[in-house]
Image (cartoon, rainbow, N blue to C red):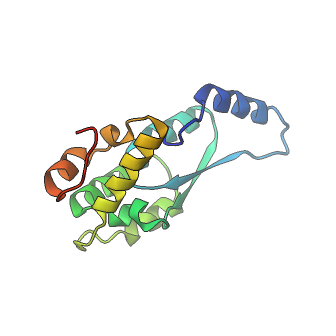
Amino acid sequence: MIRSGAKWNVIERNLELLKTVGSNVELEIFCTVSSLNVWFLPELVEYFKKQCLTIKFLELTEPDLMSIVNLPVEFRTQAVDILKSLDTNSSEIKNMIGYINLTDPFHILERLVMHILMLDNLNKENLFDLMPFKDYALKKLTPISYARY
């Protein structure tokens, strides 16, 4: 889970409670897709399908360093493959895929990595270790002070 401090058992208990509110209430899940969570979307979609809950997607645009459109091309390609693999008829996902320019070499990976490392330090976590671009970043980026590495 990307959100530090979230307790999954509490979230699940609250979802179960909300499902019992009544038949005139429609429960939908909204997920903001970012460069931090795109890698875990298949599991999230599968989980909510098993819960018989609708999931809607929003594309994160700000801060720009966390937008999937600013990942290095190699990882944008992976993100597009993940989005295409999702078992969903989401028009939001289709729009995201269409919006991602896979030929644009511009990215701001250094700022993203610094942000993740700052969050890891602040939250005493290791989110950076879960990112598929970790090795790429460690090899390609010029002098960033990686406290843990």
Compared across the picture, whether 133 is left or right of 96 comes to left
Q: Is residue 126 above or below residue 119?
A: above
Q: Residue at x 52, y 62 (%)?
A: 92
**Quarter-of-image position of residue 98:** bottom left
Is 146 located above or below residue 43 in the figure? Answer: below
Q: Nearer the viewer, residue 68 or 57?
A: 68
Residue 11: give x, y in percent of width and height: 65, 33
Which is nearer the eye, 10 or 78?
10
> Is 67 placed left or right of 135 in the picture?
right
Q: Can you say which quadrant of the picture contains the C terminus?
A: top left
Q: Nearer the viewer, residue 51 or 72?
A: 72
Tell me what residue is drawn at x 37 percent, y 36 percent: 126
Asked if one can make out residue 85 in the rendered structure from this viewpoint, the answer is no
Q: Residue at x 22, y 52 (%)?
A: 137
Q: Position of residue 144 (x, y in %)?
A: 23, 55
Relative height, residue 114 to residue 125 (above, below)? below
Quarter of the image holding residue 49?
top right
Would residue 78 be found to the left or right of residue 87 on screen? left
Query: Is residue 111 in view from this perspective?
Result: yes
- Which residue is at a point 28% across and 53% down the rendered structure image? 78
Residue 4 rendering spot, x and y as whole percentages: 53, 39
User: So how many labels did they put on this image?
Assistant: 0
Percent x, y of residue 82: 35, 50
